[in-house]
Image (tube, rainbow, N blue to C red):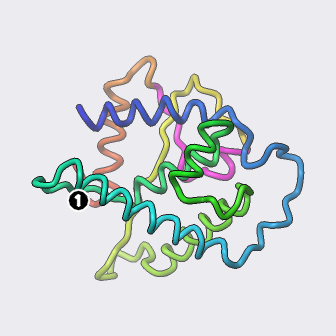
Amino acid sequence: MKFFASIVALLLSAAVAANAQCLAEDDNVQHTKTDNPLARTRLYKGESIFTLKLLEAINAATPSENVFFSPYSLYHVLLLMYFGAKSETEQTLRKGLELHWTEDKPVVWQAYNVGKKALAMRFGQNKADEIQFVSVDKLFFGKQIPVKECMEDKFFEEIEKLDFENDPESQRLYINNWVENTTHGEIT
């Protein structure tokens, strides 16, 4: 039930993100700053700071409990939401994700893609590898929620549309099965 509630919260937040510009105020303007060689390093540093702050907050809230979660996944799902956010939500996510080093979303998107490709090259999808890294960072939108085509193009692996309105239970099961299959049964 908690998982389903989390998905619903993500969907509501993602609906706001889906209606914003793709990555910039004017999607037709070409951004030349996307070749920033330090962008990935800065994004990684922001992710590290986010992780340490999150661990500190969880430890303070539950000092005598064991809590298992993925700061990496949480950061990346929030990062996906940042790409579609605007106004106050964008500023809140920028601050929380430690993205103070740029206000240029295309630069952050490039760093995100470079990191994603680096992980894919390092760990690959070869089942013979002893170590596998599988990310289940995905935003599930209701089919009735409009998502800009440019967002679907940029995030084709991270966005999927489902029919929550007419068949919420089978969509919940679909998501749970997708997570279980993608993580090879490690998350059920």
Name the residue at the front extreme: 60
Q: Residues within 10 Å of mark 1 (few under 14, many from 20)?
A: few
Q: Is residue 98 left or right of residue 187?
A: right
* The quadrant where residue 55 appears: bottom left
- Choose between 188 and 5: the one closer to the eye: 5
Q: Is residue 53 left or right of residue 108?
A: left
Name the residue at the right extreme: 29
- Choose between 181 and 89: the one closer to the eye: 89
Residue displayed at 72% across by 40% down: 149
Residue displayed at 84% across by 60% down: 31
Residue 160 is one of the magenta-drawn residues? yes
- 39 w.r.t. 64: above or below: below
Name the residue at the left extreme: 64
Mark 1, residue position: 186
Q: Which residues are magenta?
A: 150-163
Give the x, y percent position of residue 91. Answer: 62, 44
Give the x, y percent position of residue 158. Answer: 53, 50
Residue displayed at 45% across by 56% down: 75
- Choose between 13 and 171: the one closer to the eye: 13
* The quadrant where residue 73 appears: bottom left
Kind of residue indicated by mark 1? Glu
- 143 w.r.t. 84: above or below: above
- 76 w.r.t. 93: above or below: below
Give the x, y percent position of residue 169. Answer: 31, 25
Name the residue at the top extreme: 166
Q: How many marks?
A: 1
Residue displayed at 70% across by 55% down: 105
Residue 96 is one of the magenta-drawn residues? no
